[in-house]
Amino acid sequence: MDEQEIMDEHTDALDNDDLLEEDSDIDEELDDGDMDEGDDDVAPVAGQAVPVVVDMTHVVTEDQSGLRIDKVASQVFADFSRVQLQGWITDGSLLYNGSVQKPKVRVKADDVLHLSTTLQQHSEDQPEDIDIDVVYEDDDVLVINKPVGMVVHPGAGNQTGTLVNALLYHYPQQHHLPRAGLVHRIDKDTSGLLLIGKTKPAQMALMEQLKDKSVYRHYQCVVAGDQASLLRHRRIDAPIGRHRTQRTKMTVMTAGREAVTHLLNVTPLNDNYCLLDVGLETGRTHQIRVHLSHVTYPLVGDRIYGGRRQLRAGLTEAQRQAINNFPRQALHAYTLGFVHPTTGEDMEVTTPLPEDMQKLIAVLSDGYDDE
């Protein structure tokens, strides 16, 4: 499967809570490190797009002899999508032995491919000086701890103040990657870890890992439900689709997409509330919230899927107030595991529960251990 096919596999699920499999308006332009020699010593200025001049030459090897021009180009100019390269072959930006040829022409050993073009900033998203909490970073991968209240990427009603705006300020070279390198997302009111590719090959490799489930994501959440009942739902397998009449909501439905959630650990906070460690096998919009509500044990603070079912019997006044006043779903993405796209190393990144959830847990468990 080539890069374009991988990206196409991800285009039908932008609305997913966890997979950033964007819809068809994804722009295929990307970040590339091949600057002109004269630009090597020019440091990018935060908040500015980085114009990238590409000037690359490849001599066809014996192993590549007989392949189509576009196939060889996609192998050797791996930062670019096959569709993008085909366009450059057609418009003369990518020459074959000094001349313009069709993408389907077969190459011979010692033929020369020469790519010369300038990448333009593809995104209208603007850089903004917004603090981000970097949990892990190297040349290929970035892991961010997203705070509650931050939208991941611009959209209707949220053109500014998003994580993408922040990334474009602190990492201006991300201008040339789809969605600034993001490969998945979490809700505005969910906190926790997000994985970002810093190069096109890294982003594509990580997206493919999400597709084949070699990326794992663990969440912690506070739910209204007792331990014994929750343990009967260690694996929730129920398809999820968009609600037929309330279009901003998701629901369990026969015609929905496959959705599987695993309750990895259930820790009682008191007789009627628990802290869950949850693993995702799939990444559907609002999956954890919908699945737990479906089995009648909603997340604390979930106004959309929880309602009055969040309030269980036996609460003290302080506990009742803590639940009623908790301003968002008590859900945190605390562990992210993946295979490093360059080194092949197994990586795991974790981040602790945010302060608001720690305080909620303390109130709900107050006196329980003394019983």
Image: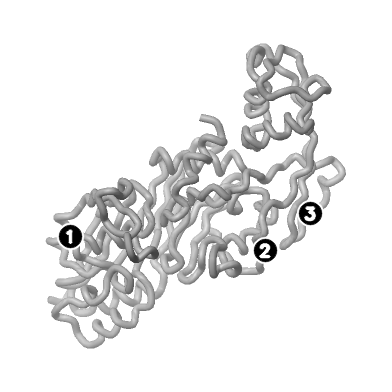
Residue at x 75% of width, y 22% of height = 101
Q: Any mark on residue 127, and which?
A: 2
Task: Determine whether label 1 and label 3 are within 8 Å by CB.
Answer: no
Image quarter in which the C terminus is found: bottom left
SS class of the residue under badge 2?
Answer: loop
Which of pointers 1 and 2 lies earlier in the amino acid sequence?
2
The span from disc 1 to disc 3 (Cα, nearest Å) is: 54 Å
Residue 208 spot, x, y in % from top left: 47, 39
SS class of the residue under badge 1?
Answer: helix
Q: Any mark on residue 249, and which?
A: none
Asked if one can make out residue 336 in the rendered structure from this viewpoint, the answer is: yes
Residue 21 spot, x, y in % from top left: 48, 48
Q: Which residue is mark 3?
A: 43
Q: Which residue is mark 1?
A: 230
Left or right position of 22 against 355: right
Residue at x 33% of width, y 56% of height = 287
Q: Report the mark closest to the observer, 3 or 2.
A: 2
Relative to 247, residue 214 above or below:
above
Which of pointers 1 and 3 lies earlier in the amino acid sequence?
3
